Image (cartoon, grey):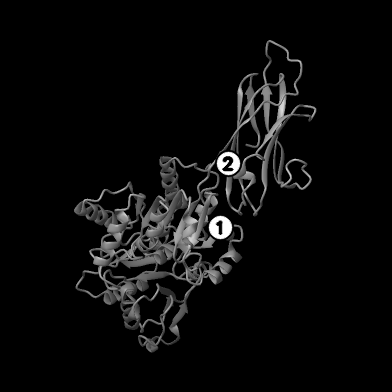
Amino acid sequence: MFGTEARAQHGDTLHLRLRLQLRQPCRHLVVSYHIKNRQNQHILGGHSSDRPEVHGRAWQSGEVLELAFDIPVHLHQGDYALTVLAASMADVAHYTDAVFHLWADDVATLHVMPRAHFPLSDLIEPPQDLSVIPHAPWLVLDDFFPNLLTGFRVAEYNAHLAAFPQLSVLSSLGDFASQHARYAEHYPALAHRVRPFAPAWLAGAGLAFLNFLNNAHQFLPALQQYRVPFVLTLYPGGGFGLDEPESDAKLAAVLACPLLQALIVTQGVTQDYVQRFAAGRGLALPPLHRIDGVVVNPLYLEVEAPARDAMADKAVLDICFVAERYMPQGANKGYPAFIAAALALADCARLRWHIVGGGFTPEEIDVSALGDRIQFHGRLTTQDLRQFYARMDLIVSPNQPYLLHPGNFDGFPTGCCVEAALCGVAVMATDALQQNPGYVDGESMLMLDAASEVSLAQQIEIRIRQILADPAVLTRIGQAGQVFTRELYAPERQIGERQRILRSVAQRLGLPVPMEENPLP
């Protein structure tokens, strides 16, 4: 609104629309406007003190209030300026207890054009027509946020909180209080809009957004009870598997819910499976959107990372394995194959090996033959992981589908590989389900063949020995992979597209859609 200029004639109706976001809790809220002439004299004005839905309720920090005043223009020719006030005021008759939250002068100007008949007075206050525009809250429902270890959730939900002032995050995380305290240290401006889940928060909500099948299935009863429309991103994992009875039962329940307004898929194999699944059960799919990949933390994209030169100014090649240990030996992530290759390369003194992720120890598989050339780093935060990748030359991800449980599979490349590639680290990975969104073997990635008669460990060993003979190959792959990954995982493509889908759904539902101010981190 600031800087707005309007022109009107006597008898026109001026439409004044105000949208305010509460920065702190307050009661007895009164919003008023004042139109003043060139002599700074009050000519006309209006307020919301007689509206109980504004003045009579307790407002919480982060909530949005939108008001629309329709003002008949009964003014002399000339120029006028608009002042907007917001205050807590219990005694609206005497104004003796006003606590001002906003006092904004000259936020807009009005030029009234001349008319034929000259009025006797310009001190006119015509009756106003005021309507309060309801803003139904939007919600993100999740079971792990605000734990800082989930980098993609932090990136995505923070971006949504910044773009949609009526949005809050509700979490069913078990140790919510301690994790929220850590989150608040990093993001104090957003922390008050992240709350522990309680079903009552869904009352009156206009739209919900969820990631993962397990989340959708967990929150489905509450969504149905309060009739809240929702959008779901169906990532690999998180309870979603291929041709697995428990996953299929959850998927059928979610897809059959008429409240599901849009479905986002992130892999070609997921898109094909969902379409076949719905057709086979006679289910009508909502609008289906495919966005290849995953949201990544903006730390990886804030600054153009410099091109990497493998082995430059280094006597060794640093090779890493990054994953969480979800089953014995981390078999689904390919940890046994990685260690077997490392042991086969124990004769190469120029190689150092690094293991990142919770649960991996040097005792589970004997790595004593590698001596001090292997390090176990445990879990790393996003900031620490980014610094870690700055020292790495190659990440190896020989993951395999269906091992963790029937139907289970990972996205391609895994989130850890995406983050590594954004830092210029070359990626060596399997793609058993042909999910590749455009990487080229030997150019932007090194591909391992999970179906080959040659074991994964042997393939890793062979390729690393080739790299040792010509490290420039690794440099070219790391640089090309970094360029392609920055394009594929750019915020505009990942977060921006998700926000466009949410806005489109909101418009279709007839919900007020916030102005697009700062949608991306």
510 w.r.t. 497: above or below:
above
186 w.r.t. 288: above or below:
below
Write the residue at 64% across / 52% down: 23
Write the residue at 31% across / 63% down: 240
Quadrant in which residue 252 is drawn: bottom left
Residue 436 in view of the camera: no
Identify residue for label 2: 66
Separation of disc 1 and disc 2 at Cα?
19 Å
Near mark 2 (Cα within 10 A), the count class, few <14, some 14-19 or many ≥20, is some
Secondary element under disc 2, as helix, strand or loop, is strand
Drawn side of residue 45 relative to residue 389, left or right: right
Could you tell me the amino acid type at mark 2? Glu
Q: What label does residue 193 carry, if any?
A: 1
- State the residue lying farthest toward the top: 116
Q: Who is closer to the viewer here, 155 or 459?
A: 155
Residue 422 in view of the camera: yes
| Residue 508 x/y as whole percent | 40, 40
Drawn side of residue 54 relative to residue 40, left or right: left
Q: Pointers 1 and 2 in contact (CB under 8 A)? A: no
Q: Who is closer to the viewer here, 270 or 511?
A: 511
Drawn side of residue 328 relative to residue 503, left or right: left
Sequence-earlier tag: 1 or 2? 2
| Residue 329 x/y as whole percent | 34, 80
Q: Nearer the viewer, mark 1 or mark 2?
A: 2
Secondary element under disc 1, as helix, strand or loop, is helix
Could you tell me the amino acid type at mark 1? Arg
| Residue 488 x/y as whole percent | 40, 53
| Residue 397 x/y as whole percent | 35, 70
Near mark 1 (Cα within 10 A), the count class, few <14, some 14-19 or many ≥20, is some
Write the residue at 42% across / 50% down: 498
295 w.r.t. 512: above or below:
below
| On-image quarter of the N terminus | top right
